[in-house]
Amino acid sequence: MNGAALTLAALGDVEVALTVAVGAARCSVDDVLAFTEGSVISLNASSDSPVELLVNGVAVASGELVELDDGTLAIEVRSVRGRTSEGASRS
């Protein structure tokens, strides 16, 4: 990088994967193999439970699902994880 210091501003255009975790479930491989269209899998969350926002698999915030005027889902961020002294998020 020609000796220039790397700054957060230099990373501004880097794309990351955002994932929203609504809930989780555990089941056997046999159960997974039995899934068909229309299968219902019970999650460990209710419809009004907070959801986790993950960036590249790391939880960085939590919030609630909201429906926008056009019918799409979005997340309204309610809390953002603090940074540790190393600058990394911890959950």
Image (cartoon, helix red, strand yellow):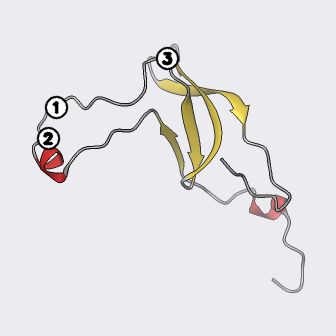
Quadrant of the image containing the N terminus: bottom right
Residue type indicated by callout 2: Phe
Numbered badge on residue 35: 2
Please tell me how crowded label 3 is: few (under 14), some (14-19), or many (20+) other residues with Cα within 10 Å.
few
Q: Position of residue 40 (x, y in %)?
A: 21, 28
Q: Report x, y in % for residue 75.
A: 57, 28
Q: Amino acid at mark 3?
A: Asp
Is 87 rendered above or below residue 31?
Answer: below
Q: Which of the 4 image quadrants contains residue 61? A: top right
Q: Earlier in the sequence, mark 1 or mark 3?
A: 1
Please give the residue where the numbered disc 1 appears in the rendered image: 39
Marks 1 and 2 in Cβ contact (< 8 Å): yes
Q: Which residue is mark 3?
A: 48
View extreme (top): residue:
69
- Where residue 78 sits, quadrant-wise, is top right
What percent of the width, then of the height, locates residue 60? 66, 44
Residue drawn where x is 69% and y is 51% of the image: 90
Q: Is residue 80 left or right of residue 39?
A: right
Query: Relative to residue 80, is residue 16 drawn left or right?
Result: left
Q: Distance from label 1 to label 3 (Cα)?
A: 22 Å
The residue at 56%/37% (across/down) is 52
Which secondary structure lies at badge 3?
loop
